[in-house]
Amino acid sequence: MDSNSLYYSLELVAGTGCTLNIEQKSALQTSLVILKKNYKFHRVLFWGKILGLKGDYYIAQGRGEDEMKDTTNLYSFNCMDWFLLPPATHTMIEEVSKTARGRFMGDPSYVYELLEIQRQGEGDDAVEEEVVIDEEVSVVPRSAFIKSPHGLVQMNRSFGGLSHSEAGKLDSFLHLSESKNLKKKSILEMADLNPAIDFLDVLSDDIPKGSWSLQFECASKVCVIRSLLWPGRTFYHVPMTPQHGYIYIGDGTKNLDLPFML
């Protein structure tokens, strides 16, 4: 969720239980503005809240010129003091996935052990979890972002929102992550796509089918999409306006039983 419209955005997804108390909202409203200025970000997003056993992690994400490549992740325990998260490498993700199981402890200094060999602490685990969730369930409306001929991904300033009929289809929503399915499409399928806006994967291609729940709420004025694979991830879009965003409030656990529940 963009920090500039945090109060408004939280109200739109409050029906799912994804919300914060007044103190947390007020603290974020102030600290994210300071964060943007100090780190010289183009914009700052409140990514969400990971629930831990001893404490909770509040995650913010700073965006630079490129919306996909220039990202910086930070965490906080009180919504005021922010600490940088190290960039997640493939090696880090592989090592953490071998040792970290179950719920977050809520302590960055906590060290997981495997066969008496010490691995990365939970602070690195928070990076890995945030990256995985972002790759699998970060959602944006079609045309909300454009890709230049030089490969630069930026917000589409002329995006005015999806129509109500478009907002009711999963085909109108895309993953804000590196495309995996476009390379599998045939030449005929690619001919109908606009490379400036159709450079991301659509939600309707996700496996397993049925891993998304799309509903209209607030008197059918807001389109709300929930991930059943990552419970707690909620996306919203107000049709006919550029307003959209997503938030994650959960324990960082993936629903691996989903294929058997559908």
Image (cartoon, grey):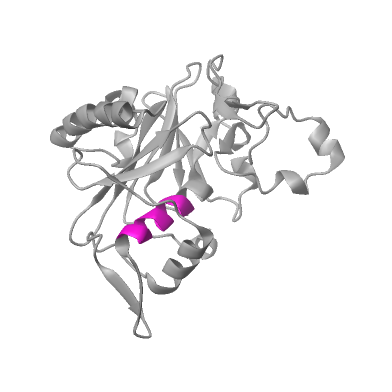
Q: Nearer the viewer, residue 151 or 188?
A: 151
Identify the residue at horizontal 21%, vertical 62% (top origin).
53
Any magenta on residue 126? yes
Q: For the magenta stretch, what is the residue range? A: 123-132
Hey, which quadrant is residue 253 in on the image?
bottom left
Identify the residue at horizontal 22%, vertical 31% (top origin).
31
The quadrant of the picture occupied by the N terminus is: top left
Percent from the top left, x then y, of residue 228?
Answer: 46, 51
Q: Residue furthest left?
A: 23
Q: Nearer the viewer, residue 79 or 62?
A: 62
User: Going by the image, does 136 lie left or right of 149?
Assistant: left
Percent from the top left, x then y, of residue 133?
Answer: 45, 51
Q: Is residue 223 visible?
A: no
Labels in figure, total: 0
Hey, which quadrant is residue 39 in on the image?
top left
Identify the residue at horizontal 43%, vertical 51% (top origin).
87
Percent from the top left, x then y, of residue 173?
Answer: 57, 34
Q: Is residue 2 visible?
A: yes
Q: Nearer the viewer, residue 51 or 128?
A: 128
Q: Main secondary structure of the magenta part?
A: helix
